[in-house]
């Protein structure tokens, strides 16, 4: 019994962290929790209604029709549609499935939407606590991973794929553990975490998993002396096992899409418009235009000029996080290097193919200056590669920036905290910094919600004679399409 109590005490910090992240979530998303069954979290012109429909469709396909959700027989009837990429976008809908079955798609959407913040917080806490060595430092790193503005922008648009990011922090931590001590158990866990992260959305393979994995592996090899010793038997077996476990899960899910790519059937997924949805370089330092603390100031007018999409192009990092990250870099230079590299990599790529400063594109004079051309950035070349082609939103690479910033800020807290501070004083200071960070990163308050109503004609149709039906008319309006799905 005494052993059990000691073990419970050693793990109770996870419960306190979860409760703290839940309280933070309830505060920044007010009044969503008061409207779980009557409203939907998000803004009217976002993709919320499409995600609610998708949650409903997964439940109906699996439990009622007993078929794969990939074959969407409800759309384009009678031919239906087949979307081979759906298995590698399945995590969101599988998480929602039990809630949808027990309640409704509306409630399920809201629960998963809210849970995404807490799960991200706990995953960020696990990573930052492990690297910093302190619970409170880890907690603050997790706070950054909860509230960062680009993710909040996606929450505004109802983009669950871009909110459920917890698997990326977990995979990063699992990979670090393998690099520290390459055991079979750690390799299997890292492989499972990689597979979990690989079922969020396929573009994150290019936007996060590949660059982070490669950077951490190169950093570990650089630290190994002599460097050829990095490729020892234990490391090679662990990496092979990790990738093998992930491949056993991911390859069967991805295979149908790869076959369609080879057959030229997924060309319609190639996106255009990356320049418009990329970050303006100034946006890293300017709060979102609808932040309640700047909303009525000239700064908000400037922010509206550089943030053209409430959902995609909010690049603000937060001055509290930047300052603490700077302290962390100064205090722990050696440990910070790999995170600085990852952060800078994300900062450059999130700017997209062409450089924007304060709104307009930067024009570079050529020869005598009579001709001027936009300044090309690295993303201009990456944008034509597989997976990159399927996204017009380079700003989503900001998850690398924010995870690096979370770790560096956690280092900063360990340097800022003084040895003579008691636990109570540490909590007061940490609470104050957390409130400042949450306030400056708000994108809207109170958080917008959409009434979960059904149009009167459809309510009438439910009790109408069976020969009546709904006919879809061609209408070039995405909001109308999403409302029709709902």
Image (tube, rainbow, N blue to C red):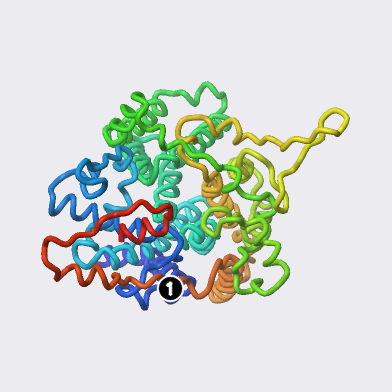
Q: Is residue 17 visible?
A: yes
Against 257, residue 57 (above or below) is below
x and y, in percent, of residue 134 in the image: 51, 59
17 lies left or right of 457? right
The residue most toward the top is 228
Against 291, residue 163 (above or below) is above
SS class, disc 1 = helix
**Which residue is nearer to you in this view: 258 or 263?**
263
Q: Is residue 335 visible?
A: no
x and y, in percent, of residue 17 in the image: 43, 66
The residue most toward the right is 368
**Which residue is nearer to you in this view: 57 or 246?**
57
Q: Residue at x 60, y 40 (%)?
A: 349
**Which residue is nearer to you in this view: 36 or 371?**
371
Mark 1 — residue?
26
x and y, in percent, of residue 4 in the image: 27, 64
x and y, in percent, of residue 295 in the image: 64, 72
Say which quadrant the N terminus sits in: bottom left
Number of residues whose C-alpha sits closer than 10 Å to that of mark 1, classed few (under 14), some (14–19) or many (20 or more): some
Q: Residue at x 28, y 36 (%)?
A: 253
**Which residue is nearer to you in this view: 133 or 59?**
59
Against 455, residue 323 (above or below) is above
The answer to which quarter of the image holds residue 164 is bottom left
Say which quadrant the C terminus sits in: bottom left
């Amino acid at each position: 019994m005494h052993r059990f109590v000691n073990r419970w005490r050693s793990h109770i910090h996870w419960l306190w962290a979860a409760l703290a992240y839940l309280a933070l979530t309830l505060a920044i998303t007010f009044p969503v929790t008061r409207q779980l069954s009557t409203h939907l979290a998000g803004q009217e012109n976002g993709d919320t209604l499409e995600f609610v429909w998708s949650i409903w469709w997964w439940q109906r396909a699996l439990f009622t029709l007993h078929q794969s959700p990939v074959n969407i027989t409800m759309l384009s009837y009678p031919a239906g549609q087949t979307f081979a990429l759906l298995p590698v976008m399945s995590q969101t809908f599988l998480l929602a499935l039990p809630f949808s079955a027990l309640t409704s798609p509306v409630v399920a959407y809201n629960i998963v939407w809210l849970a995404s913040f807490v799960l991200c917080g706990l995953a960020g806490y696990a990573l930052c606590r492990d690297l910093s060595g302190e619970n409170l430092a880890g907690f603050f790193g997790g706070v950054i991973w909860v509230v960062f503005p680009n993710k909040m922008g996606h929450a505004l648009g109802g983009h669950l794929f871009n909110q459920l990011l917890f698997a990326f922090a977990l995979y990063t931590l699992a990979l670090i553990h393998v690099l520290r001590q390459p055991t079979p158990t750690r390799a299997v866990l890292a492989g499972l975490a990689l597979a979990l992260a690989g079922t969020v959305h396929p573009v994150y393979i290019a936007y996060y998993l590949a660059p982070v994995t490669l950077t951490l592996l190169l950093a570990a090899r650089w630290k190994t002396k002599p460097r050829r010793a990095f490729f020892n038997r234990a490391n090679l077996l662990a990496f092979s096992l990790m990738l093998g476990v992930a491949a056993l899960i991911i390859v069967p899910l991805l295979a149908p899409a790869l076959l369609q790519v080879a057959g030229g059937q997924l060309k319609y997924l190639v996106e255009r418009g990356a320049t418009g949805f990329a970050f303006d370089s100034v946006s890293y330092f300017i709060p979102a235009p609808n932040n309640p603390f700047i909303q009525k100031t000239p700064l908000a007018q400037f922010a509206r000029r550089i943030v053209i999409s409430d959902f995609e192009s909010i690049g603000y990092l937060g001055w509290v996080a930047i300052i603490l990250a700077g302290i962390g870099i100064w205090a722990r230079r050696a440990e910070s290097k790999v995170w600085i590299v990852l952060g800078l990599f994300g900062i450059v790529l999130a700017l997209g193919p062409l450089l924007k400063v304060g709104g307009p594109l930067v024009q570079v004079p050529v020869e005598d200056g009579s001709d001027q051309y936009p300044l090309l950035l690295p993303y201009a070349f990456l944008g034509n590669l597989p997976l990159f082609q399927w996204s017009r939103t380079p700003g989503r690479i900001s998850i690398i920036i924010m995870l690096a910033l979370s770790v560096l800020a956690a280092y900063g807290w360990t340097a800022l905290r003084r040895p003579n501070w008691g636990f109570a004083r540490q909590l007061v200071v940490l609470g104050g910094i957390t409130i400042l960070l949450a306030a400056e990163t708000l994108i809207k308050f109170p958080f917008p919600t959409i009434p979960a109503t059904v149009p009167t004609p459809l309510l009438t149709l439910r009790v109408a004679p069976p020969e009546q039906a709904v006919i879809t008319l061609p209408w070039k309006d995405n909001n109308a399409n999403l409302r029709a799905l709902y």
